[in-house]
Amino acid sequence: MPIYTQLAFLRTTQSSLALVFCSQILVWSMGWTLFILLVVLTVVHGNPTMTVRTGSGPTVGFDQHPNSVPLGEDIQTTTEGESEVVEEVMTTGVLNPSHYPARRAATVVQHYLNTRYGSPYRWIFFSTVHSGSSEDVAEMGRKYQLELTVQEMISNVSGQCSAELFFPEGEGQSAPQVQASCEGLHQSNTTAQEEAFYQQHRASNNLVSGNNIPDSYGHVEPSMKPFWQLGGVASSFIMLRESNESTLYNMAQVANFTQLETEKDQLRFNYHVLLHEMISQEIIHWKLLVTWSPEQGVQVLQTELQPKCHHCEAPPNTTN
Amino acid sequence: MMMLGLGSVGLVLLSLAVQSGHGAQDSAVWSREETTERNYYTRYHNMSEITAWMEQMKRENPDVVSSMVYGQTYERRNITLLKIGLSSTGRKKAIWMDCGIHAREWIAPAFCQYFVREILRTYKTDTKVNEMMKNLDFYITPVLNVDGYIYSWHNESTRLWRKSRSPGTGGCTCYGTDLNRNFYANWGMVGVSTDCCNLFYCGTKALSESEAWAVTDMLGKMREDILAFLTIHSYGQQLLVPYGHPNTSAPNHDELMEVGLGAAKAIKTVHGMDYTVGTSPDILYPFSGSSQDFARLIGIPLSFTFELRDKGEHGFELPEDQIQPTCEEAYAGAQHIITYTHDKAFYSYAATVRATLWTTLLAAWVSSTILL
């Protein structure tokens, strides 16, 4: 073999040997690297990398909550004239306690309990829904069953209630029908306070009145509290009557109240209340004629819806 | 002993000087002592007071607080935010918080004020808050709907105003658009009204309201940097996650729910209050065009609406003696979200870098030992 070929051969052999050697090292170290990488990564636990932040739109999908068994939950949108109306086909079956159907139904139970048991010294609010279910009653409406905790606001006593509600459907929608039985609420003994309040205001020589309760700062004068609470209970009669599955009422404020002459041993008041309806966010004005005595409880003799004042919205003359 | 004596004399003189200055204060300018007094943050404040307070925060904390006017209301008032953070040379990640998009929800601006005071009070001593102030800038708008807020302070009959104060158009004589229906996020689709008298009036078109436009503009400029978007409302005791539209799910819905539930848990440990967590179509009602939805749609991963106290006993007119406990629990909830988002951004990145470095080093070491 000529020398250059021998040299070339040697060089080739050399380089190929070197190549083989290097590749073996490479493979070996790669293997080790991979092994170590695996070991290290199982030990180091970091959070996944940050969410990709493009302008990507929402994923169209149905988000399932573990507790609910939605049978036919759907929202349909129809357009009526200028406004869009969302028709909600409500959940039937087991209710998720933190979802709105349970909350709205629980609020209706709250209103019912106030019409039955409320007084200037007993005002009930629901705290939690534990469980519930609803079912359609063919062409008549929907029935709910709830287990909930309620709380009496003045004494802070809690009660456990079982309730059944029926929301009727159809034209000339009537008030929901409610039945409820509660344990524990009787523990708030209000007899002494109620009696004292009754005796204090029964004589008609010093008729009481007040306005803006609570005031803008949420403040209620101590002497006004029973009248505020009575206003809340009286409002419950309206709120119960006006409620359906698409409403959530609370009393926002007693705009004003005036005591009238006591009649037939009943304290009597004219109330003007502002109700907040959460689902429409509207503030609705009502006037009520209310009577109360410890024996007879709260009764609402007359109610009158006040028209919404649109021209009242114009800017005031002074600017801040 | 002499030093002690001199020191105590100095302290006495100082306290006397501060007290004498106290009486002569202009009511619109709060002295340092007054703003750090507990009872400032236990009262509601009108717009002039909040504006003066913002100036105060800047004056007292010039290294960390600056302000920015980022838009105008319909009635031509400034929309101002406070930018709070330790200055750095590079570009920083951000947290966005706005309060008072609905005028009557007075507890919301009160919370923004409380939040600002709290981070300024603790960032020097609390290592976590300090770290977050180093790595993040907080962009906080105490009152977004300035016109509406001022109107709600006018008298008792305007107290429950909700919307902006732009006049109706096309023969409709009522005032105001619901700013939280006016954003470019499925605008006009659900939970809105085209009647200008309605409380959900969504405007003549998306971003017809300058207030919504101002937020959109800022978020658009900062979208790469904003880690979390918090918008504060009342009432109802809820934490809402996107989207308001019923048939859509955020891509990170599970994460949003997990963080939200964690925040609700943090809230409950403060004063025992229950806050429900979920999408608005699930726990409240469906609606589109909200600022929260817009934030999520442009890619801000964590977007929450806080509905603060109460659950209806007082509603919008929350008593002032509940301001402090409400703010304390809401602060715990907000901090849970902010800490999560901060740690996710800064710790997971660091962990990944660390792991990569170690792996490379080990591989190099092993290779070299094999070769030798």
Image (cartoon, coloured by chain):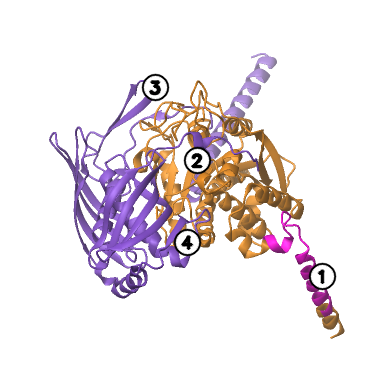
Chain colours: A purple, B orange
* Residue A309 tag number: none
Label 3's element?
A: loop
| Residue B104 can be seen in this image | no
- Which quadrant: the N terminus of chain B? bottom right
Q: Nearer the viewer, residue A177 or B34?
A: A177
- Which quadrant: the C terminus of chain B? top right
* Residue A82 tag number: 3
Q: Nearer the viewer, residue A219 or A261?
A: A261
Q: Are marks 2 and 3 in contact (CB under 8 Å)?
A: no
Q: Are marks 1 and 3 in contact (CB under 8 Å)?
A: no
- Mark 2 → mark 3, Cα distance in angstroms: 22 Å
Q: Which residues are magenta?
A: B9-35
* Residue B162 tag number: 2
Main SS of the magenta part reads: helix
Left or right of A169 in this view: B83? right
Location of mark 4 (residue): A220
Q: Are marks 4 and 3 on the same chain?
A: yes
Q: Are marks 4 and 2 on the same chain?
A: no
Give residue B309's position: percent from left, percent from top: 45, 54
